[in-house]
Image: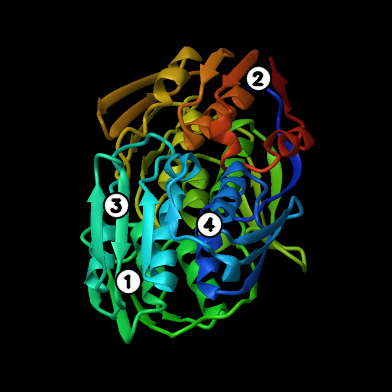
Amino acid sequence: MQKEWYEIKGGKRLEGTVTISGAKNAAVAIIPAAILAGEACVLENLPFIQDVQSLKEILEELGVTVDYTDGGCMRINSSTLTTTKALSEAVSSMRASYYLLGALLGLCHEVELALPGGCVIGARPIDQHVKGMRALGAEVELDCDRNIVRARADKLVGAEIFFDVVSVGATINVMLAACMAEGMTVLSNVAKEPHVVDVANFLNMMGASVRGAGTDVIRITGKPRLHGCGYAIIPDQIETGTFMIAAAATAGDVIIKNVIPTHMEAVSAKLMESGARVIEGDDGRDFYLRVIMNERPRPINVKTLPYPGFPTDLQQPMMAYLCAANGLSTINETIFENRFNHVRELRRMGASISLKDASTARVKGINALRGAEIYASDLRAGASLIVAGLAASGTTCVHNIQFIDRGYEYLEKKLTALGAEISRKMK
């Protein structure tokens, strides 16, 4: 099997305009949710990334008819569904496949699912998912020997469910199942992320009744059946943030189009605190953000929090940016365990980072990172290494870019158009 990596000749100022793709985190939930229609749905503005392709293959294994073009349009017809067993390697290797639990349980009242994998960034248990399905009346069995979860119900009945922790995955998964439960379901202590709202909007387009997404409480009135629809995915909040940080890290001037500025307020605030200018605008068709940086970053403190706080998925790129700050920055990761896997690689580039404990990093800024051979351990760690390589002096080779391909569409093409010297190599 051929291996690919990115070669980056750093130190080039990013300048120009980039257009953001559809949101990965929304897409990987909405694609399984389309099963609930029982007929055809057409999804637009999907990012052309590995996770979307993997979900296409998983749905086809279930008998669902899927037509997909690299133009970002996918037609999903679940009327041809032949099985509720999703046990393939593709399922177990992908975290977001767990949304099939809520979708298949809602539509068919039974599902057998390989426990999902994905990036190694902590335990990320599914206990809140299981709690929610059981509250709706499902019998749920975890087969730890075979790494499988089974769920079935004669019928699903609405319930009041309080999540012990704020979980995006559990909020969406239980929401999917509850859409076809009898009566009303009230979900409390829910996640408020933009992609939770996007999934709720999609469900409503299919005829569901979901109210309150984006607030602390979501109320769902179950329907006996849903229907097909067309729907366009929101822009990717994390891709937007990655380009914002990359622009600042390279002392650049970048206009980032097809964005929702309110989704980016926590990131914009931290970049401005570090000395960057962030300008919000509207060109008549799209909102845009312009990021301008002309100086060495000021040190800042960053704490990851559920939305609308600073996103955990941008903690790693932000750390790469702060490696060149003029002073000591502190980063506190409160969402996931083991999300400092990129620290060792940044140190290879000369970064001065100390770990106070498993959740707190202190970053003492240096004048500039230097190029090195570095290895991504997960998707967002990979993004941080790209940011580091763009800002560093010399040549950086980023390996294990299959992780990066999971979440970023045409990354090297977009960066090249902004003036970066980045190319995909293969051997």
Identify the residue at image location x=49%, y=59%. 29
Q: Between 152 and 272, which is closer to the camera in this rendering?
A: 152
- Say which of marks 1 and 3 sits in front: 3
> Distance from label 4 to label 1 (Cα)?
34 Å
Kind of residue at disc 4: Leu
Kind of residue at disc 3: Ile
Question: For residue 6, which quarter of the picture?
Answer: top right
114 left or right, relative to 422: left
Q: Position of residue 41 (x, y in %)?
A: 63, 70
234 left or right, relative to 270: right
SS label for mark 4: loop
* Badge 1: residue crowd in 10 Å (few <14, some 14–19, many ≥20): few
Residue position marked by numbered label 3 in the rendering: 126
> Distance from label 1 to label 3 (Cα)?
20 Å
* Badge 2: residue crowd in 10 Å (few <14, some 14–19, many ≥20): few
Q: Quadrant of the N terminus?
A: top right
The answer to which of marks 1 and 2 sits earlier in the sequence is 2
The answer to which of marks 4 and 1 sits earlier in the sequence is 4
Residue position marked by numbered label 1 in the rendering: 216
> Distance from label 3 to label 4 (Cα)?
22 Å
